[in-house]
Amino acid sequence: MNDPLQAQLPRRDLPILVGGEWRRGRGHAYQSLYPADLSVSAELHAASAEDANEAVESAQHAFATTDWARRRPHERARVLYRIAEGIRARREELAQWQRRDNGKPINETRALVDSAAGTFQYFGAACETLEDSLTPQRGEQITMSVHEPMGVVAAITPWNSPIASEAQKMAPALAAGNAVVVKPAEITPIAALELARICEEAGVPGGIISVLPGKGSVVGDVLVKHPLVRRVSFTGGTSTGRGIAHAAADKMMPVSLELGGKSPTMVFADCDIDHAVAGVLFGIFSSSGESCIAGSRLFVERSIQARFMERLVAATRQLRVGDPVSERTQMGPLVSSAHRDSIERYVARGLADGGRLVTGGARPEGEGRERGCYYLPTIIEGLANSSAIVQEEIFGPVLVVLPFDNEEDLLAQANDSVYALAAGIWTSDYKRAWRVARAVHAGTVWINTYKQFSISTPFGGWRDSGIGREKGRLGILEYMEQKSLYWGMNTAPLPWAA
């Protein structure tokens, strides 16, 4: 199909944003490639360590000298509302560039753009309605608890859902009155840069936002260790998150870490099979499985396993894998050839461990898909819960299936993981749903649905899936410092000094 952006491709010498200045990065030159056919979307220079240091220092200067932190909450909120409207005004253009960034189907990228707009609107409302508290008086003082912006915060975002991920960090940080230095994934730079332009046009002062595409080992390292950075919010792999946590501990700096997952989806014999099949498919194969909350471990009650799997496999084989431009496409390509190679190695390892390939396990052919980074939705049975591909995050369209006999057996298997990010339950028994939802180890549990989000509901994981929470009305407080005020109301001097 013809690419709607064809006349604008490739974008040459794409500038980055450093301390309010749009300019060429000082790092290495590279190309942003479209995963569907490996054509060039943009040519740019990455940010360097020097750029990162300058961005942080400029952000601190802007925080101290502009009125952004000192504006009344409703005044900052007004800017966030304008950002939301700016995103909506450019919805289709942003969705198309997001599609070029990482190969997601256009219907999915439109939803991500809508999510970003809704996030800025929500945190605008949270900002202007956030209340500090007058705490109960326990002596001759009036006591108050107030919240203030931190200063410079760093937002390090992943490649799988750029514009939505950036909004989830930038919106509450800006609402709180901070300056924000954003490091998008090197391979998906476009969405963050376009979002920053909208923020500037909406009235965010120059220098308050910087966007630094580049390597995590270069840019991210500077941001995490810089003494002026007061908080880091990171979404990405667990090993990188662990390194950030160590660096943050040395600085006594708070962090939010949204990391990996190997989420269990649990199907009971009394489920509505139509709903469960659709939910399992969406949970693992939407976004080509490139999702931290993908339902990649499927547990099916043994008494219905054969019947359920027959339905699931037939539906999987009907999924439309192809051109992200098409409105009909359900699965686009993977983000890169290297990532597809990693997934193929995992599948080979699972089969070598005794797994049985039920469907998929190959690259699709025809319709030009050989030029891109495509991989078929894949289902593997017959592995033990201890197998590497059952335990390790693959981050792709690979579903492993295991049977269970009762709730005790199920929970023992489902909770046998270093990850605890999300889980899904499919049952008609509301009491069972309650028991299992409370007993499974996960930060988010979906019951008779999956992979549905609300900006009003906190999100995050346990254990190796991370620490801290994003979203929710109080998510703005993650980017603020709490301060207590005591107002002396005593009429006589303090007696100790008498």
Image: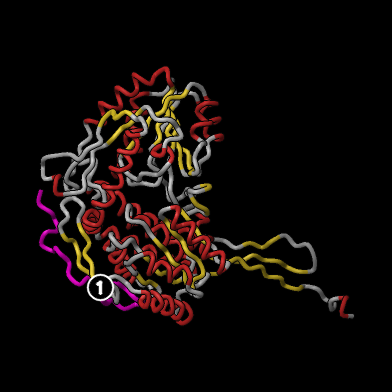
Q: Position of residue 273 (x, y in %)?
A: 36, 23
The residue identified by callout 1 is 15
Q: Is residue 88 visible?
A: yes
Other-residue count near label 1 (Cα within 10 Å), few / some / many at <14 / 14–19 / ≥20 = many
Question: Which residue is rendered at x = 35% and y = 45% of the image?
Answer: 395
Question: Which residue is rendered at x = 31% and y = 61% of the image?
Answer: 85
Q: In the rendered image, which quarter is residue 208 located in?
A: bottom left
Q: In the rendered image, which quarter is residue 28 located in?
A: bottom left
Q: Is residue 79 visible?
A: no
Q: In the rendered image, which quarter is residue 166 located in?
A: bottom left
Assess whether residue 18 is covered by the magenta stretch. Answer: yes
Closer to the camera in the image, 491 or 311: 311
Q: Amino acid at mark 1?
A: Pro
Which portion, as a residue range, is magenta? Answer: 1-24
Is 391 on the left or on the right of 24, as rendered?
right
Question: In the picture shown, does residue 315 fall above or below 70?
Answer: above
Question: In the picture shown, does residue 455 fall above or below 403?
Answer: below
Q: Position of residue 325 (x, y in %)?
A: 17, 48
Question: Which residue is rendered at x = 40% and y = 69% of the image?
Answer: 181
